[in-house]
Image: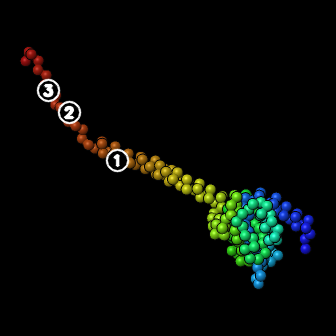
Amino acid sequence: MKTKAQKQEAIDQLEKTLPDASITIFTTFSRAGEQGLSVSQMQQLKRSLRELESEYVVTKKTLLTKALEDLKYDGIDVYGMDGSIGLVIGRGDIYAVAKAAYQFAKANPSLKLFVAWSDGHVMTTEEVVELGTMPSRDELIVRLLGMLNYPLQSLAIVLNQIAEGKPADIAPAQEVESDTAPAEEPAEEPVVTPNE
């Protein structure tokens, strides 16, 4: 059991870490009567989050509640979350962090996603799942570039086809013009001289 000083140190650490996060996802990794995440699964989760410069922190509900109160993170009911609490503390791209947490939870049902805190407000479980199923920022940029590039590629193809087909299109037009008979010139009138 932690001493009072150790508990305060844990609260101070949470109060220092949470405001720096771009997103904090509240999860449970173990519930009464159910098998929780194994040690190897927990290591796998932490490793996948480290790749995103994020971390997974396990904490007590009482300590977390105190830290959230001090930080004025209103609207998060820690005691309403069934089971042992773990936090996905994301830094950087919130979409990538949410996606990593969602995919891990999908593959490992022992990890359950609850609410999240991002940009000064609470996100519902549905919003967290929606974030997790959206393409990442990099994927969206690639798609956007593809969409912008498509009309240019199409234009280049059309212009290339026109350039390749242009001489063939011009030749028949010239032949048609040369095949037409020239307009008849008026007949020359005889020149009459006064001596005749």
Of residue 27 and residue 110, the one placed in the foreground of this image is: 27
**Residue at mark 1:** 172
Name the mark on residue 15. none
**Residue at mark 3:** 189
Residue 78: name its quadrant.
Answer: bottom right
Label 1 – label 2 distance at C-alpha: 26 Å
List the single residue furthest toward the left.
196
Q: Say if residue 50 shows up in the picture.
A: no
Disc 2 residue type (three-letter) = Glu
**Residue visible at 82% across and 58% down in the picture:** 16
Name the secondary structure under disc 2: loop
Name the mark on residue 185. 2
Disc 3 residue type (three-letter) = Glu
**Which quadrant is the C terminus positioned in?**
top left
In the rendered view, does 192 fall on the left or right side of 95? Answer: left
* Neighbour tally class for label 2: few under 14, some 14-19, many 20 plus, Cα within 10 Å: few
**Residue visible at 47% across and 49% down in the picture:** 159
Label 2 – label 3 distance at C-alpha: 12 Å
